[in-house]
Image: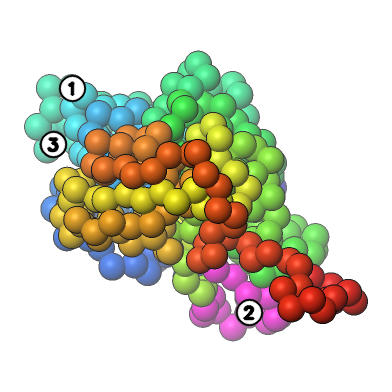
Amino acid sequence: MLESVKDYYGKVLQSSDDLQTNACCTDEAMPEFLKPILSKVHDEVMMRYYGCGLVVPEQMQGLKVLDLGCGAGRDVYALSAMVGETGKVVGLDMTDEQLNIAREYQDYHADVFGYAKTNVEFIQGDIDQLQNLPFEDGYFDLIVSNCVINLVQDKQNVLKQAHRLLKQGGEMYFSDVYCDRRIPQELVNDEVLYGECLSGALYWRDFLEFSKQAGFTDPRLVKDRVLTIENAKLEQKIGHMNFYSATYRLFKIDGLESACEDYGQAVRYKGTIEHQPHFMMLDGHHKIETGKIFSVCGNTYRMLNNTRFKDHFEFFGDWSTHYGIYPDCGTPIPFATDGNSLAGACC
């Protein structure tokens, strides 16, 4: 399957027009600040883009970033503009044809972004083997990936190694494809379905478990959408399985708990993150408006206080009193509250 993926993205696909489904397509409104950046990315790089989301998180100036499965480098070059000349972006991919295009335009993009020299590096390698990368533990501030982890065989190892490569307080911010059930092996073996980012997709609950086992205790869903496939022949093979494109952020922070616990804490956003003067959207459930006292669980408190976002918030409360599970974002208490037993229910 590894060689099949190489051939599919190196020889079969010559541009995004060659895709047979909408799985590897970004169906998301482009932020205004990103439009002028992408307008400077070379056309040949742009035409070989096969992502399913936007992997451009907040507050990236000066960061060291790793892009897993960078392809021809569209996201790498967009991120290189976001991190600035003092930052660094490393793109990793296994496909010769894609990397040849990415490397061809390093000096071009350094020039259009006004840098004295390029701030990007491209490495050929297998995402399954991140342990072989020439970087020490905790080297990167941010790891991104755009619709690639579904193509990898050992997804658990990818998450484990990503956690190792991130510094404390760093994050993995990535878009990928998920399924509402585990995919049967005969479909996993289908080279077209696999190459189209469908039959390698993780069952969503398996992904959450793998993330937690890797050390990302509290995965946060940022955005998601249903994939409609739009290919009758492939839809017939898929049957009743449902696929989703989703963007997650996984923080490497010591002390995160497996549920959202209430310690009576709150934050106030200063409105100082670039391009986000009115609110900061941490994830799909936490839209934090500027100037407003915003009640948070202990995990959210740490995600803002122990990361690059700290200087952009005021923090209230401590860890002296625990008030139980947080009602709005945690698992509710499983016991009967009216004195009646719920024995016999599966959950």
> Label 3 belongs to which residue?
113
Residue drawn at (64%, 37%) of the image: 214
When asked about the image quadrant of residue 78, the answer is top left
Return the mark for residue 80: none
Residue drawn at (19%, 48%) of the image: 270
Callout 1 touching callout 2 (CB < 8 Å): no
Q: Can you tell which of label 3 and label 2 is closer to the viewer?
A: 3
> Label 1 belongs to which residue?
117
Give left or right: position of 62 versus 150: left
Question: Along the line of sight, which residue is nearer the eye, 63 or 269?
Answer: 269
Q: Above or below — where is 291 with respect to 154?
A: below
Quadrant of the image containing the C terminus: bottom right
Q: Secondary structure at mark 2?
A: helix
Amino acid, disc 2? Glu
Within 10 Å of disc 1 (Cα), the crowding (few <14, some 14-19, many 20+) is: few
> Label 2 belongs to which residue?
235
Percent x, y of residue 218: 56, 48
Residue drawn at (59%, 70%) of the image: 243
Task: Decide if residue 10 is in sight here.
Answer: no
Amino acid, disc 3? Phe
Residue 75 painted magenta = no
Q: Above or below — where is 179 with respect to 280?
A: below
Question: Along the line of sight, which residue is nearer the eye, 324 or 105?
Answer: 324
Task: Report, in whole angstroms, how far the alpha carbon at label 1 lies from the one at label 3.
Answer: 10 Å
Percent x, y of residue 65: 37, 32
Q: Secondary structure at mark 1?
A: loop
Percent x, y of residue 168: 47, 27
